[in-house]
Image (cartoon, rainbow, N blue to C red):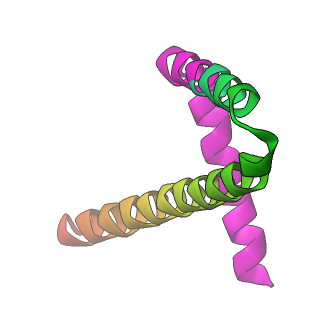
Amino acid sequence: MLDEITDCAVSGRLQEIFLKDEEYRKLSETEKEAAVSCYRELPEKYHELVETLMDCHNSCCGKLIDLAYKQGMKDCARLLEELKIK
């Protein structure tokens, strides 16, 4: 349970940071527009398949963000330890 709470806090904090980044916001908007356009142009029988693909993509991106953040924290702790700054 604690891991789930930590993961949510990490994801929430990273999302706040990303939303402050202008380039990220522009790319996110472009992605959203492309997704809406693609969804509208596809026959309805493919909508569920595309939604499943996007859910998987979003989950993978979220996991990648969490892993990168955690690795950064480990690297920082290791560096502080090497510099004897505990």
* Along the viewing direction, whichever of 38 and 25 lies nearer the viewer: 38
Which quadrant of the structure image shows residue 53?
bottom right
Q: Is 29 in the magenta? A: yes
| Magenta stretch, residue numbers | 1-30
Q: How many marks?
A: 0
Q: Residue furthest left?
A: 82
Q: Residue at x 70, y 59 (%)?
A: 52
| For residue 30, side relative to residue 43 (left or right) | left
Residue 59 picture location, percent across and down: 62, 61
| For residue 50, side relative to residue 26 (left or right) | right
**For the C terminus, which image quadrant?**
bottom left
Q: Is 41 in the magenta? A: no
Residue 28 vertical placement versus 14 (above, below)? above
Which quadrant of the structure image shows residue 18?
top right
Residue 58 picture location, percent across and down: 62, 52
| For residue 79, side relative to residue 48 (left or right) | left
Main SS class of the magenta portion in the image: helix
Residue 51 vertical placement versus 15 (above, below)? below
Residue 70 vertical placement versus 27 (above, below)? below
Residue 81 picture location, percent across and down: 27, 72
Q: Residue at x 58, y 27 (%)?
A: 31
Q: Residue at x 72, y 33 (%)?
A: 39
Q: Residue at x 53, y 22 (%)?
A: 21
| For residue 32, side relative to residue 22 (left or right) | right
**For the N terminus, which image quadrant?**
bottom right
